[in-house]
Amino acid sequence: MTTKNAIYKKFKDISQDEYIAPGTALCAGCGGLLALRLAHKVLGKNVVIVNAAGCFTLLSVYPYTPFHSSWMYTAMACAPAGAQGIRDALDILIKKGKIEREDDLKVVVLTGDGTANDMGLQSTSAAIYRGLDFYYFCYDNEAYSNTGFQMSSATPYGSKTNTSLPARINPEGTIQKKKDLFEIWRAHKPPYLATISPSDPIDLSNKFEKALKFEGPKLFITFSPCPPGWSFGASKSVNVAKLAVQTGIWPLKEAIYGEVKHTVILKFKPVEEYLKTQNRYDHLFNPVKQVDVINIIQKDIDNYWKRYLV
């Protein structure tokens, strides 16, 4: 990512303030939580989080909360509707002089990939259509992880979940390909959307900083390595996330009013290096290497980048 006009150029430029206390009930090594902590540093303390049911529901369990900011819990399908109510209430209070404009809150919807891609998509599309001024933070761990790691429409081809196990008929495991949430949002032409990763805090921080300048719907999809679901050691999350970027399987990009720009472009490593870090792909290598499946995954990555690097 070019740092010429960036606010954050080095790791030490990132604020040391913490708005999410440690010691939460989330799984050790959760990549999504690391990304949320980094995002909150940029957004500051004046935030209200509308949390759709999912893994992050465990962050704030009455009477305990790790948030220094405000928090509201909703069902999976209706977080953007809850965000609309809060945004409208804040606007009315500001208009009536009940709260000062400098005390306004940034409204953040916090969801997993199941909610974002599946049952919450309808209310999200409606909120974007209405031009709701909010941040939509999707932690993408590529499955319904909170309820036992079942397949979602964000589950990638060739991986296994507890509802898409490899078998004789479909030895590759998941036969569907991952839904492209970035492009679904981009079709709505919101002011700003981006993909981020906990392995690149500079890129993440600059994207949230840039989003502060826009009014309207703003999407952030964060790559969220899941140690228990993907079956790797909790200390490896950042390394797994870094390999996802280095192999090109997780592009770091942004779109401003629909115009796409990639913020990190590398000389990509073979996707096998990423796949071998997680047991959810171990059936592609043992007892027999499924070369055809691995080649399909690699070809999809290559075709994606050909569209942007020609």
Image: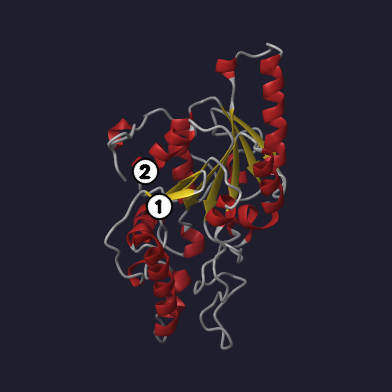
Q: Which mark is residue 252?
A: 1
Q: CA distance from mark 2 to mark 1?
A: 8 Å
The image shows residue 261, relative to residue 97, as above or below, that is below
The image shows residue 78, relative to residue 305, as above or below, that is above
Residue at (59% x, 25% y) in the render:
105
Residue at (36% x, 69% y) in the render:
271
Residue at (38% x, 69% y) in the render:
302
Work out whether residue 169 or residue 248 is closer to the camera in this orientation and state it.
Answer: 248
What residue would you read off at disc 2?
203
SS label for mark 1 = loop
Q: Position of residue 14 (x, y in %)?
A: 35, 33
Residue at (56% x, 83% y) in the render:
170
- The residue under label 2 is which amino acid type? Asp
Quadrant of the snapshot with the C terminus: bottom left
Label 1 Cα crowd, 10 Å radius (few <14 / some 14-19 / many 20+): many
Work out whether residue 26 or residue 119 is closer to the camera in this orientation and state it.
Answer: 119
